[in-house]
Image: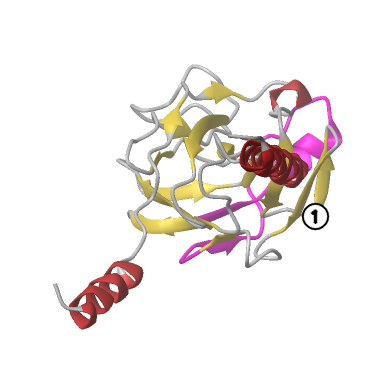
């Protein structure tokens, strides 16, 4: 095959858009205490519509304050909600007191950037204390269960609780960006806050210190091999 064809093929591959890695979702959970917040791993990015706010040591930045890390695309901000925020922790109540929303489904609504390919991440998305019980599924190769906003019990999809929910998912980054779509069988899709945490580095890729040790080791092995060859040549035949 000609080199120009190989080069053209390589350029085509580079130009292809990255697909979102599949997120494995856990069962949606009703908010209760600050113990809800995932703490494993290191914080990659976090934001809240009501931010900036810190809950259980996790700092959530203001909405769209981290454009290279996490942002909502095509979502409108609602200044307040009328559901009753009745949690014991005031900061947690604040976190869940506002929402971003839009009417109908929204592809790639949430974009997470700055990821390390091959690294493992945990994603946690919160709903708000809303005045109605609307439900949203989050989709990236796999769809979460319905995650409810809840300020009062109403409608056929209303859960037994009067509190909203959150959902946790995990994925291994296959590109520097991850895209999450929003879908709903109810009126709107919504999100109050999100945090992303890196829980493991790329499998099989040594850390810089390990690279230095490997290079040193290769050098020592090479030097030993050269000495052995020189000794063999110098030995009487």
Q: Is residue 103 visible?
A: no
Q: Is residue 183 above or below residue 57?
A: below
* Residue 153 position in % (x across, y down): 49, 26
Q: Is residue 96 magenta?
A: yes
Compared across the picture, whether 236 is left or right of 191 comes to right
Left or right? Give the position of 210 relative to 28. right
Image quadrant holding the C terminus, namely: top right
Helix, strand or loop at label 1? It is loop
For this rendering, which residue is in front, 209 or 186?
209
Residue extending farthest left: 1
Q: Residue at x 44, y 58 (%)?
A: 109
Furthest residue toward top? 160
Residue wearing tag 1:
52
The residue range painted magenta reads 73-101
Residue 118: % across, % down = 51, 42
Figure coloring: secondary structure
Pick the residue in front: 81 or 211. 211
Q: Residue 158 placed where, x, y %?
A: 42, 26
Count every numbered label the image shows and give the total: 1
Furthest-bottom residue in view? 4
User: In this orientation, which residue lies closer to the viewer: 110 or 89?
Assistant: 110
Which residue is rendered at x = 71% and y = 41% of the image? 227
91 is higher (above) or lower (below) than 48 = above
Q: Residues within 10 Å of mark 1 (few under 14, many from 20)?
A: some
Residue 1 found in image quarter: bottom left
Q: Residue at x 33, y 27 (%)?
A: 156
Q: Picture coordinates of residue 182 (x, y %)?
A: 39, 49
Residue 63 in sight: yes
């Amino acid at each position: 095959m000609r080199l120009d064809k190989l080069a053209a093929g390589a350029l085509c591959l580079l130009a292809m858009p990255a697909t979102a890695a599949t997120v494995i979702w856990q069962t949606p959970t009703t908010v209760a205490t600050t113990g809800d917040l995932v703490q494993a791993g290191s914080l990659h990015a976090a934001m809240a519509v009501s931010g900036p706010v810190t809950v259980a040591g996790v700092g959530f930045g203001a909405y769209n304050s981290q454009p290279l890390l996490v942002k909502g695309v095509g979502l409108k901000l609602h200044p307040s909600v009328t559901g009753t925020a009745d949690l014991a922790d005031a900061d947690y109540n604040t976190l869940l007191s506002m929402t971003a929303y839009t009417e109908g489904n929204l592809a790639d609504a949430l974009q997470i950037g700055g990821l390390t390919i091959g690294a493992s991440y945990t994603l946690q998305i919160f709903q708000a204390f809303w005045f109605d019980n609307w439900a949203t599924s989050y989709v990236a190769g796999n769809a979460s269960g319905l995650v409810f906003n809840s300020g009062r019990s109403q409608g056929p999809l209303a859960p037994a609780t009067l509190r909203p929910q959150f959902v946790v998912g995990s994925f291994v980054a296959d590109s520097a960006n991850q895209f999450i779509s929003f879908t709903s069988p109810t009126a709107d899709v919504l999100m109050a806050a999100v945090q992303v945490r890196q829980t493991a580095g790329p499998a099989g890729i040594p850390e810089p210190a390990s690279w230095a040790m490997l290079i040193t080791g290769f050098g020592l092995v090479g030097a030993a091999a050269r000495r052995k060859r020189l000794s063999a040549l110098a030995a009487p035949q």
